[in-house]
Amino acid sequence: MADYMNFLDLEAIASADRAFENKQYNVSTMLYRMAHKKLMKYNGDRMLPIQMAGDVKNKLQRSEMIWTKNPQQTPLTYRTWSLSKTSYVAGKQCLKHLYLDKYKRNERSAPSPATKILWEKGREFENLVRKRMFPNGIDVKDAMASKFNYFSSYTDSALKHFREITLFEASFIEDKILVMVDMLHKDEKGELDLYEIKLHTELTEGILWDLSIQYHVVKKRFGEKIKSFNVVLRRGEEDFEFINVKEDLEKLQEETGNQGFEFIHFLQISSEPDIAMGPHCYLLYSCGFKDYCTRVATLPDYHV
Ligand code: SF4
């Protein structure tokens, strides 16, 4: 691999080019700036990264200049969170899972080949649903070149500036909890339909809690503007059905809100809890820390 490869953020540059073409100058400026900063750290003598730094600098200056004439496009902000949808579901399974997911992520077992195939199928199914339902949707992940800390800021900006819009991976942070919604459609009246896409054919308990924490965060932000909150389930190889579960999620809100708060508090004050393995390791999902927990349980003097 060439010595400069680690200094090229081609994804950011491509996303910035797209944003510039779409007149989203706040986005293009931010991404060109990040890509340029990275290129400037290269101190070798290869011409390609040096030329690219010059090109990106020119694009950055042009984007900045036009952006100053579009003050309604507010700067995107770097945001952090204490709990994600994934960590919330981990906490529902087991507090130790929640703790390990935050502080010992490297101990998670590598996914098996079968799990990888399932993930790939999940991605294909998600793309199929997106294309059929909302072929013109904007993917926040692509638009922001996977810069996760800017997703929620970008989502806010897009919802503010487009009267009607569909976003994939629309991201929101409320009560220090981050959720990313698979598909969100805002209609002309400003009302929202939200969709979570699952490869499953049935609504499981794990999916229900996953939806519940999303609904908790989105409801806090949009309240009565939420028209429907749907889960998309598979029906055969190329078919699917979406079910509005908003009323079911309403019933879980008190528990979800309280637990979200408790999990954040737990992560702030707790050390690794001593929880024995049991049926709960498979209950919502098959926990990725089973190898770790098996290993530490067999150590002669295991103290947490
Ligand atoms: S393997 Fe079981 S005990 Fe260990 S973190 Fe996962 S759910 Fe908890």
Image (cartoon, grey):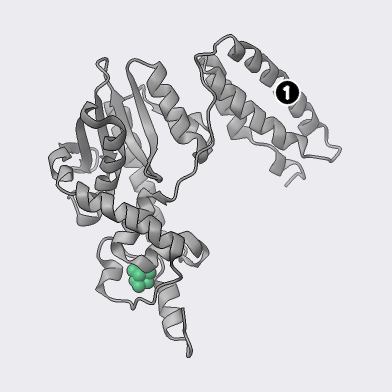
Please identify the residue farthest to the top as the structure is shown.
69
Up the image or down, 154 lies above or below 179; here it is above
> Looking at the image, which is closer to me, 217 or 298?
217
Residue 251 x %, y %: 14, 47
Q: How many marks?
A: 1
Residue 23 x %, y %: 52, 14
Task: Specify whether residue 239 is in view.
Answer: no
Q: Secondary structure at mark 1?
A: helix
Up the image or down, 242 lies above or below 68; here it is below
Up the image or down, 174 lies above or below 130; here it is below
Mark 1 Cβ and ligand 1 under 8 Å apart: no
> Looking at the image, which is closer to me, 176 or 231?
176
4 relative position to 200: left or right: right
57 relative position to 133: left or right: right
Task: Say which residue label 1 marks.
Answer: 57
At horizontal 16% and vertical 43% (from top left) the residue drawn is 250
At horizontal 59% and vertical 9% (from top left) the residue drawn is 69
* Quarter location, residue 9: top right
Residue 165 x %, y %: 34, 20
